[in-house]
């Protein structure tokens, strides 16, 4: 039996094992008419091509050819077709599509025609990072807390940049008009096997936040991509526009993407502090991959967004926060990224940076439980900051041994040119 002959799929809470023929039979019985083969470009923008159920056996065995020259970050030196290979364990029913003629989605890995993994496929990059960590006896898990604005849409579905409400942090209805939209988003996510942890109105007018639980890196990245698709789809169904950009409105809070991080050793050793020390060591050089647009640096410079390379259990202006808990170093939150990040690339970088800290036994510095806003320039100068402009971030990545060791030259050039 081949590696592709059995899959585990998730449909509305039921796990089922299928052979190729059984999968096709399921599609017939459930009236599934389209299968979306999903992948992302190097920047994390979701793409897909749809196939009919009768074609899926061929696709699973041989892959689906795509024109790589038309995909952002895949062009240039690529002159031949690339091939999508569906990961059947990621099969998900899209509940907002019609009941008759249903649509399912699978995430794909990308290879050359001979089966060699494509170096700009960030999903494969993350899989390699997970495998490398596992070979060292280390397991990472990640969670997502993503912010977004809901704006009123015009008759063509485009954003008017008029916030859906004027509510503030954790306000309730009727001030919070996004309550029912968030509810619909969370229920849709549950149907797709993604468990939301909590949701609430954020500080900006029309700004919302939904957090979902930690999981293994690949599933967490897949879920983050699905999450944005769900939010945008549900918003559009309600006559709204969901905006994930880091700074959609001047002089108002930007959108952050807080990444929860946990690391465990198969020896039982307490390694998260060392992993965090490695992340703090390498974060300056890799900032361009977490904050990818000019607006990202407006957020880091103008909001209370964390830009000081430090950690704390109390100060939310620090780059990494370890929330108070009985187990002091159980989990941490990286607070500088914004939602335009490619989660596959971000998680891979965090794994490699964390491993640097673990393998080199780096020690976590003392916490920065200080109020940065009350400090004078001389005192602040003692704290290293993230790059304060996109050009500074690009130059840091181009000259970084860490970045160029773990990320392909063509990916680095895509972000830094």
Image: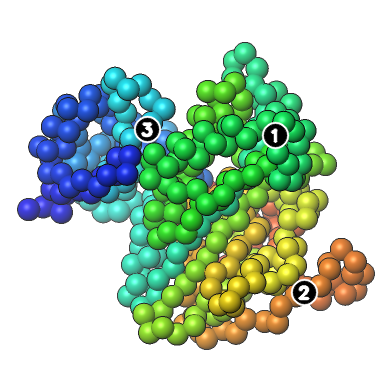
Which mark sits nearer the N-terminus, 3 or 2?
A: 3
Decide: is 79 above or below 177. Answer: below
Residue 270 appears in the figure: yes
Q: How far apart are marks 3 and 1 (CA)?
A: 29 Å
Q: Residue at x 70, y 39 (%)?
A: 172
Residue 175 appears at what percent x and percent y? 74, 33
Residue 413 appears at what percent x and percent y? 53, 52
Q: Residue at x 32, y 75 (%)?
A: 135
Decide: is 73 above or below 400. Answer: above
Which of the labelled discs sits on residue 54, or is there none? Answer: none
The residue tagged 2 is 369
Which of the labelled discs sits on residue 173, or is there none? Answer: 1
Q: Residue at x 81, y 72 (%)?
A: 370
Which mark sits nearer the N-terminus, 3 or 1?
A: 3
Q: What kind of colouring is applied to the model shown?
A: rainbow
Q: How far apart are marks 3 and 2 (CA)?
A: 45 Å
Residue 140 appears at what percent x and percent y? 44, 68
Q: Residue at x 81, y 76 (%)?
A: 382
């Amino acid at each position: 039996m081949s590696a592709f002959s059995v899959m585990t799929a998730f449909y509305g809470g039921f796990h089922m094992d299928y052979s190729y023929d059984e999968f096709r039979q399921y599609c017939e019985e459930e009236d599934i008419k389209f299968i979306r083969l999903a992948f992302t470009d190097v920047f994390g923008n979701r793409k897909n091509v749809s196939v009919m159920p009768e074609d899926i056996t061929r696709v699973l065995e041989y892959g689906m050819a795509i024109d790589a020259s038309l995909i952002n970050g895949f062009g240039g030196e690529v002159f031949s077709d690339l091939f999508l290979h569906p990961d059947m364990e990621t099969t998900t029913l899209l509940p907002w599509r019609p009941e008759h003629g249903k649509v399912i989605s699978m995430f794909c890995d990308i290879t050359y025609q001979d089966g060699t993994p494509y170096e700009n496929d960030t999903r494969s990059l993350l899989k390699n990072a997970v495998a490398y960590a596992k070979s060292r006896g280390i397991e990472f898990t990640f969670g997502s807390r993503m912010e977004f604005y809901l704006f009123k849409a015009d008759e063509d579905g485009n954003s008017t940049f008029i916030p859906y409400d004027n509510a503030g942090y954790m306000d309730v209805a009727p001030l919070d008009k996004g309550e029912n939209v968030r509810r619909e988003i969370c229920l849709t996510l549950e149907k797709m096997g993604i468990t939301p942890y909590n949701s609430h109105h954020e500080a900006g007018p029309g700004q919302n936040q939904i957090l979902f639980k930690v999981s293994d890196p690949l599933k967490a990245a897949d879920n983050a991509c699905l999450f944005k698709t769900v939010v945008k789809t549900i918003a559009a169904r309600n006559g709204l526009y969901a905006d994930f950009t880091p700074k959609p409105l001047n002089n108002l809070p930007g959108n952050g993407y807080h990444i929860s991080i946990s690391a465990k050793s198969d020896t039982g050793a307490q390694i998260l502090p060392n992993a965090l020390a490695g992340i703090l060591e390498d974060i300056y050089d890799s900032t361009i991959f977490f904050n990818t647009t000019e607006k990202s640096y407006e957020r880091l410079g103008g909001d209370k967004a964390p830009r000081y390379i430090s950690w704390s259990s109390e100060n939310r202006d620090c780059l990494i926060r370890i929330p108070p808990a009985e187990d002091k170093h159980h989990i941490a939150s990286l607070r500088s990224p914004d939602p335009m990040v490619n989660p596959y690339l971000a998680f891979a970088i965090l794994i490699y940076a964390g491993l640097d800290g673990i393998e080199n036994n780096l020690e976590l510095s003392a916490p920065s439980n200080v109020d940065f806003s009350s400090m004078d320039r001389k005192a602040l100068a003692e704290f290293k900051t993230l790059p304060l402009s996109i050009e500074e971030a690009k130059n840091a990545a181009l000259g970084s041994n860490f970045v160029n060791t773990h990320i392909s030259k063509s990916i680095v050039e895509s972000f830094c040119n």
